[in-house]
Image (cartoon, rainbow, N blue to C red):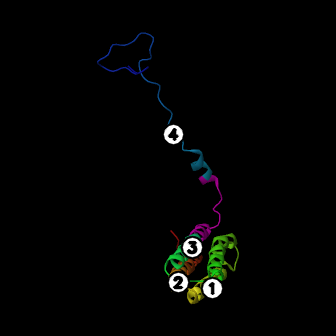
Amino acid sequence: MESGVSRPDEPEVPGAPSSPVPAEPPTGSASDAAATDAAPGDPERGLRGVVSAILILEAIAILLGVTVIANGGTSAPGWQIGVILAVALAHVLAPVVMRKRLAFWLIFLLQAVLIGCWAIDAAIGITGVVFLVAWLLILFMRREFRRRLAAGTMA
């Protein structure tokens, strides 16, 4: 038998409360309270997170392209592998500047360099083209978000 709880088929225990102590209604967690008290903040914060994540995913794709070059029979000299690794490192470090005005210019510069790596290996250049399409889509979404925010039609 649980303490303080009586069931109809069990006898009452002397000295035990006849009904359980009513629980207080939940008031919400601390994070709920912090969320309601917080200032509205930067509306493009989520977009910067998505952009940073895509830059990291692009760096991973570039590094996987290096394994294709190394195992695919293409005999690329060491300096060419070094160029591709430097481009991947630039993609990993690029999220640092996402708050700057020229962040998307940097991203498109990185895309141009990556597509230019087509001269080293076509797989790397194709990766650049695929991610260029993704960046153009994100740029369109950012423009649409800003347009709706300025018009006051955001949900």
**x, y percentage for residue 40?**
63, 62
**x, y percentage for residue 69?**
53, 79
Asked whether 67 or 144 is in front, the reply is: 67
Q: Amino acid at mark 4?
A: Pro
Q: Amino acid at mark 1?
A: Val
Magenta residues, start to end: 35-53
Q: Secondary structure at mark 4?
A: loop
Q: Residues within 10 Å of mark 4 (few under 14, many from 20)?
A: few
Quadrant in which residue 16 is drawn = top left
Label 4 or label 2, whichever lies nearer to me, is: 2
Asked whether 112 or 16 is in front, the reply is: 112
Q: Are marks 4 and 2 in contact (CB under 8 Å)?
A: no
Judging by the rendered image, the residue that carries numbered circle 2 is 74
Judging by the rendered image, the residue that carries numbered circle 4 is 26
Label 3 or label 1, whichever lies nearer to me, is: 3
- Residue at image coords 58%, 83%: 76
Say which label, 2 or 1, has the lower sequence index. Answer: 2
The span from disc 2 to disc 1 (Cα, nearest Å) is 20 Å
Compared with residue 155, is residue 74 higher up or lower down, i.e. above or below? below
Q: Are marks 3 and 1 in contact (CB under 8 Å)?
A: no
- Residue at image coords 60%, 53%: 36
Say which label, 3 or 2, has the lower sequence index. Answer: 3
